[in-house]
Image: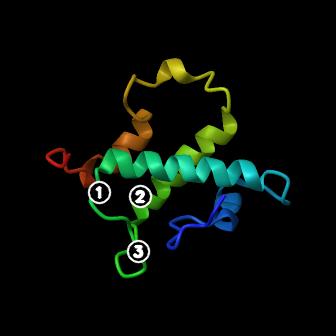
Amino acid sequence: MSTPAYEIVSIDDAKKWMRVDGTAMEADIELALAGATASVYAYLKRPAPYSESDPAPANVVQAIVLLAGMFIRDPDIADASSWQAGYLPAPIVSILYPLRDPALS
């Protein structure tokens, strides 16, 4: 998996937040971070990606880490029934909702 030019959440930071030691789960965490980041961007309908000159706010970072953690803890999506179809989980929506511009397509 290629590293994006601007990484919102590093694997090392995610491992700290998820309380994961060692390197055994790095590939899983990298995939979870990529999926969570893509999901957050899609939800926000952000016209341009975050960058070093326009960094992601703390609540976006938090949402990505929480969502990636959900993917790691439940890789088979056994808790999918608690997710409303077409939406991110409620805690993630609650964090991101103030940043979303629903008028953007």
Residue 28: x, y in percent? 72, 47
Tell me where residue 11 sits by quadrant: bottom right
Camera-nearest label, 2 or 3: 3
Q: Is residue 66 above or below residue 6?
A: above
**Label 2 or label 3, whichever comes before in sequence order:** 3
Q: Which residue is mark 3?
A: 51
Q: Which residue is mark 2?
A: 60
| Mark 1: few/some/many CA within 10 Å (<14, 14-19, 20+) | some
Local SS, label 3: loop
Q: Which residue is mark 1?
A: 46
Q: Is residue 61 above or below residue 69?
A: below
| Mark 3: few/some/many CA within 10 Å (<14, 14-19, 20+) | few
Local SS, label 2: helix
Q: Residue at x 34, y 45 (%)?
A: 43
Q: Residue furthest top?
A: 81
Residue 12: x, y in percent? 70, 67
Q: Do residues under tags 1 and 2 come within 8 Å of each other at their CB atoms?
A: no
Report how far apart the C-alphas of labels 3 and 1 lie in the structure. 12 Å
Colour basis: rainbow
